[in-house]
Amino acid sequence: MTAYLPWSPHETPNETAEYVEDLGAKWDDGTRAQYLIRPREGEDGAGEIAGAACLIVDWETQTATPGIWLRKRFWGRGYSGERAAALIELAFDRLDLDLVAIPVEGENERSRSTVEGYVERFGGGYDGLIRNATVRPDGRIVDRHRYTITREQYGRGEDSSSRPG
């Protein structure tokens, strides 16, 4: 379930409590927002936790990095694109950042396809493959594809006519 994520499942309730406390501190200092994803009323699984979404902000580089994980039974429902649209809007329209950067682990073709779709929709593009981009908790060194959307591209993207302002 966490093959392409930068973390492993928590092993103890204390580990989860520390993680939640850390997320609260990052929310307070404005460097990370974390949200639960739940199906709407009337959808299969309504009321359950489908996954989580986040927006990580690097104020020094004026860059936002959205993230998502979904439980497998909720894959293919469009949650990733819906979450991306909301977080990209947040990054540009509310936080006034310059860039949204989306990394995708090298072998995660399903996510690459999804990301390519919404990056193109918002006027962005593919920057390339970054070799040895990060180290996973199990010690594996992985490559990442990087996609970006600039503030200027977002303003010219396909969905710009439907956005406020």
Image: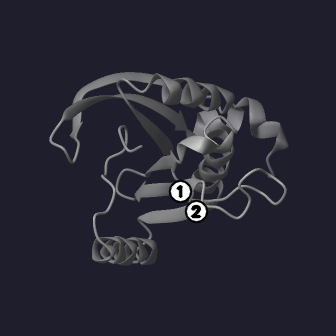
Question: Looking at numbered disc 2 in the image, what kind of residue is underneath it?
Answer: Leu
At label 2, counting other C-alpha atoms closer than 10 Å, the crowd grade (few under 14, some 14-19, many 20 or more) is some
Viewport quadrant of the N terminus: top left
State the image coordinates of residue 99 (x, y, percent, origin top left).
49, 43
Return the disc, 2 or 1, that comes first in the chain's sequence. Answer: 2
Task: Name the residue that disc number 1 marks.
Answer: 52
Q: Of the numbered discs in the image, which one, if any, rests on residue 135?
A: none
Q: Residue at x 40, y 30 (%)?
A: 146
Between the residue at mark 2 and the residue at mark 1, the CA separation in whole angstroms equals: 4 Å
Question: Looking at numbered disc 1 in the image, what kind of residue is underneath it?
Answer: Ala
Q: Are marks 2 and 1 in contact (CB under 8 Å)?
A: yes
Q: Of the numbered discs in the image, which one, if any, rests on residue 36?
A: 2
Pick the residue in front: 75 or 19.
75
Q: Within the image, what quadrant is residue 139 found in?
A: top left
State the image coordinates of residue 14 (x, y, percent, origin top left).
29, 77
Q: Within the image, what quadrant is residue 154 found in?
A: top right
At label 1, counting other C-alpha atoms closer than 10 Å, the crowd grade (few under 14, some 14-19, many 20 or more) is some
State the image coordinates of residue 63 (x, y, percent, origin top left).
43, 49
